[in-house]
Amino acid sequence: MSLQDKIQSGDRLALSRLLSLLEDEDPKGLDILSALYSNTGSAHLIGITGSPGTGKSTLVNQLALELRKVHGETLRIAIVAVDPSSPFSGGAILGDRIRMRDLAGDQGIFIRSMASRGTLGGLAKTTPSIVDALDAAGYDVVLIETVGAGQAEVDIASTAHTTIVIDAPGLGDGIQAIKAGILEIADILVVNKSDLQGAEHTLKSLKAALELGYPNRKTRPEQSGEGQGPLWRPPVLPTIATIGDGLAEVVDAISKHRDYLDNSRERASKDAERMRFEIESLLRRRLAQDFLIRQPEGRVEEMLQKVQARELSPYQAVEQLLSEVEK
Ligand SMILES: Nc1nc2c(ncn2[C@@H]2O[C@H](COP(=O)(O)OP(=O)(O)O)[C@@H](O)[C@H]2O)c(=O)[nH]1
Ligand SMILES: [Mg+2]
């Protein structure tokens, strides 16, 4: 049986093999994904983002358990955890492994950790293809935990159908969230660690911040027109992820958001946004790779040195590299 057939018949090892090929950007993996692509489109993609330590990993695990409790054992769930490759937060990887061990024996839950490899936006550059593969392999829900570097996690909103932003008491309460532009991407806001002091305050300030921004959220221009049905109002929900408290409400909000997407034009426009994002980032990478391959040995280094010596600006260096290729 081919790898593709094995994946379609639910072989987890074959799926892992494909995901590794995709992470390595191996053309073999991309060919298999292309062959499987027509099977994508039924998974509900849920992004979970927020600053490090807010409890994303803990919440993702509890969410998986709660989803199965509500929707039954037939619901197949995949978890993609994008680990920071930074040496400073390397410890998180081990922690995630240990936490995820709780779910490891469950055949209906598939867990994949991937290194972020230094890309910005809270996702690894190959995350979208990994998500596509899991969708094609028949997972009903894909939970994507981002790195959570604090800022610029907007990529997740271009990759997921439902974006959950997690906050916790004592992190600057809402103000920080507004600065990071994170309220604009949230479909559901969670105040985790509600057992800690200040949780009530965090909850209130997030609700207030949300009221201020509503309904002028920049990322939803297509919603502001008339006659397009009601707008989605992101709920703000308290949780204590360590003991699973409040998770039922989060699962309920996810179902409601899913219904909302299905009953409005949002789902189609989110899918279109996701595909555009994927095509554009692939195109950018491909063009850069093709360009660099065609450069004479040492040419890029030479330009770099000129910029370092302030003989050229980075802009001029790029212009010169490009003009030589065009010749
Ligand atoms: N008090 C409290 N601690 C929590 C809660 N949720 C997670 N934690 C703890 O917060 C720390 C960071 O959690 P983790 O899930 O790794 O956060 P992540 O970095 O956002 O993935 C861990 O020590 C968790 O046990 C909670 O609801 N209350
Ligand atoms: Mg984590």
Image (cartoon, rainbow, N blue to C red):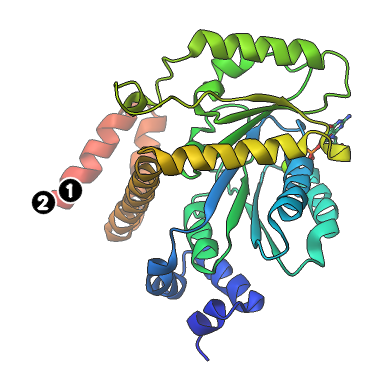
Query: Viewer-proximal residue, 279 or 119?
Result: 279
Query: Viewer-proximal residue, 54 or 38?
Result: 38
Residue at image location 59% in from the left, 42% down from the top: 255
For residue 254, above or below residue 32: above
x, y (%) of residue 152?
52, 29
> Ligand 2 appears in which quadrant?
top right
x, y (%) of residue 254?
61, 40
Circle 1 residues within 10 Å: few <14, some 14–19, many ≥20: few
Q: Is residue 223 left or right of residue 75?
A: left
Residues marked 1 and 2 touching at CB (< 8 Å): yes
Residue at image location 78% in from the left, 33% down from the top: 246
Q: Residue furthest left?
A: 327
Helix, strand, or loop for circle 2? Answer: loop
x, y (%) of residue 63?
73, 46
Residue wearing tag 2: 327
Query: Viewer-proximal residue, 156 or 306?
Result: 156
Residue wearing tag 1: 324
Q: Is residue 201 left or right of residue 133?
A: right
x, y (%) of residue 168?
76, 23
Cβ at disc 2 under 8 Å from ligand 2? no
